[in-house]
Amino acid sequence: MSLNRFLKLWGPVLAWAGLIFALSSIPALDSGLGTWDEVLRKCAHVTEYAILGFLLLRAIGREFPALLIGIAYAASDELHQHFVRGRHGSPMDVLIDTVGLLIGIFVVQRFFLQSRRA
């Protein structure tokens, strides 16, 4: 694989993973909105990981390896949050992230890849 092709496929994955890492490094993300704060943060998890799932599938080209790499990254992100003041790692967030990955991978598979085959 040429360097250009590698950067085209994996550059967005690495940039997005870096953004997720940076967001996870922010201490205490409480907006003061109570229950809405929790709902919005979980929706953000799903969205972040749906995009990551899309990018991983685009880079790898196969669903299952993209999902496994995404889940591994989600678990490592939660471990990272364990060491950030005001944050905590949560197995439930890994599950929520996995739902996001599945959505991202499904959307790519259903709409993007199928339309390319037609």
Image: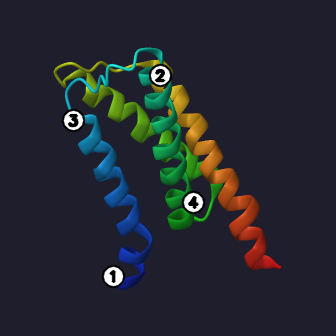
> Of the residues shown, which amino acid type is indicated by label 2?
Trp
Which label is found at residue 3?
1
Name above or below for residue 60 compared with residue 72.
below
For marks 3 and 4 on the same chain, the one whose residue lies earlier in the sequence: 3
User: Label 1's element?
Assistant: helix
Badge 3 is on which residue? Answer: 25
- Separation (CA) of disc 2 from disc 1: 44 Å
- Camera-side residue: 47 or 31? 31
Name the outermost residue toward the top.
34
User: Label 2's element?
Assistant: helix
Q: Residues within 10 Å of mark 2 (few under 14, many from 20)?
A: few
Which label is found at residue 57?
4
Quarter of the picture containing the N terminus is bottom left
- Camera-side residue: 6 or 80? 80
Give the left or right position of residue 67, taking residue 6 as reference: right
Label 2 with label 1: CB-CB less than 8 Å: no
Q: How was the colour assigned to the protein in this rendering?
A: rainbow
- Separation (CA) of disc 4 from disc 1: 19 Å
Q: Position of residue 11 (x, y in %)?
A: 35, 68
- Separation (CA) of disc 2 from disc 4: 31 Å
Q: Position of residue 6 (x, y in %)?
A: 39, 75
User: Label 4's element?
Assistant: helix
- Camera-side residue: 64 or 55? 55
Let me know if residue 2 appears in the view. no
Looking at the image, which residue is at 51% across and 53% down?
Answer: 51
For marks 1 and 3 on the same chain, the one whose residue lies earlier in the sequence: 1
> Of the residues shown, which amino acid type is indicated by label 4?
Leu
Name above or below for residue 89 compared with residue 5.
above
> Of the residues shown, which amino acid type is indicated by label 1?
Leu
